[in-house]
Amino acid sequence: MHAKGEYCNCLLSRKEMDAKEGSERQSDEGVVYRCPACGAEMVTNQTTVASFCYYCHNPVVLSGRLSRDMLPDQVIPFSVDRSEAKKLFLNFFQRKKFIPKEFFDYKQMDHLTGVYFPYWVYEVYMRGSMKAKGIKNRVWRRGKREFREIRFYEVERSGGIQLGNIARQASNKAGYELIKDVLPYRLEDAKPFHFDFLSEVFAEKGDIDKDQIREKMERDGEKYADDMLRESANNYETITDMETCYSNKKDKLSSILFPVWTLTYHGKNNSTYYYSMNGQTKKVYGKLPIDYKKIAIISLMWGLIVFLVVIAGGYILW
C-alpha cells in the first residue's frame, strides 16, 4: 500500500508511513525525570537528557513519559539563551563582594538551569451587582465650636466585569520559591505549547489539576470583582454591609509555563540559597549566602589602615 507525501506528492510505502506516524507520536510525548532526594519531577523532550536535579543537584532517574493529555496549553518562551544568562549571572555577582567564591565559580555555573514552571491562568466575564451602605462625614467649625455631620446612603452598583490573567501555581513542589520573586510575566507573549520549547531546558511537572484549582480561581475572580465594585463607590468615605451577586459567567481556565533561569546552592545547616532570573523580562532575585570570613578579613584590613593612619598622624604632630 502507498500514499502521497504531505508536501511533495511522492509515494510513501506502508513502512515509511508507519515510521512517520511513530515520529509524530514521539514528538507529542515528554520524558519525565524524578529526583529521589527532593521529589522534584522534570519534563523535557525526547532529545534532552537530565543528569541532575535543578533544585538539589542530586542525580535524577527516568520515571516515565508525559502523554498528550497532560500537556500545558501555552508557554512563554525563553527570550534569554544560556550564553546570555551566564553573562547576566556573572554581572550580577560582580557587584556582590561578600558571596562565597564557590557560589559563582565556573563549576557551579554548570548547574545554571532553564526551567519552566507550570501555572494556571484564569479569565472570566460576568455580570455583577452590589448593594451596600455608604457613609459620608462633614466637619466644620463655627467660632470655637466644631460640628460633625454623618450621612448614610443606600448604594447600588451593577455592570459587566471582565477579568483576565489571574495566575496560580500548578505545583506544590518546593522549587516554587525560585519563581515567586521574579514574577510577573507578559502573558500576551504566550505561544501554543510544543515539545520543541523544551530543547535543552526542563519543565517542572504540575501536580495540581484543573478540578482542584477551579474553585480557588473562581473565588479569586469574585474577590477581584468585589474590589472593582467597591472601587466604583469610592466617592463615599466608608462602605459597609456590602453584598454582591454575580451571574452569566463565561470563564476560561488554561495552563501555561513560565520560564526561569535558576541556580541553587546548598550551604551549611541545610540552608538553600538561590539565584533566579525571569527568562522573559530578565528580572533578577537572589537569596544569597554570605562569606563571613571575607567580612572579617576586610574589617580587619580597614581597622589596620585606620590604626596606621592614626599612628602616622600622631607621629607627624609629635
Image (cartoon, helix red, strand yellow):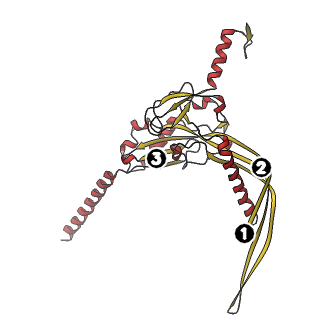
Distance of label 1 from label 3 (alpha carbons):
49 Å
57 sits left or right of 222 in the view: left
The C terminus sits in image quarter = bottom left
Q: Reading the chain from its start, which is encountered first: label 3 or label 2?
A: 3
Q: Against 146, is 112 above or below? A: above
| Residue 82 image offset from top left, x and y in percent | 51, 35
| Residue 52 image offset from top left, x and y in percent | 45, 33
**Mark 3 — residue?**
92
**Mark 1 — residue?**
240
Residue at image location 81% in from the left, 60% down from the top:
158
Distance of label 1 from label 2 (alpha carbons):
26 Å
Q: Reading the chain from its start, which is encountered first: label 1 or label 3?
A: 3
Q: Secondary structure at mark 3?
A: helix
Amino acid type indicated by mark 2: Tyr
Amino acid type indicated by mark 1: Thr
Q: Against 18, is 195 above or below? A: below
In the image, 57 versus 172, the foreground residue is 172
**Mark 2 — residue?**
125
In this view, the mark in front (1 or 3): 1
In this view, the mark in front (3 or 2): 2
Neighbor class of circle 3 (other Cα within 10 Å; few <14, some 14-19, many 20+) is some
In the image, 136 versus 11, the foreground residue is 136
Q: Against 284, is 6 above or below? A: above
Residue at image location 64% in from the left, 14% down from the top:
19
Amino acid type indicated by mark 3: Phe
| Residue 307 image offset from top left, x and y in percent | 24, 63
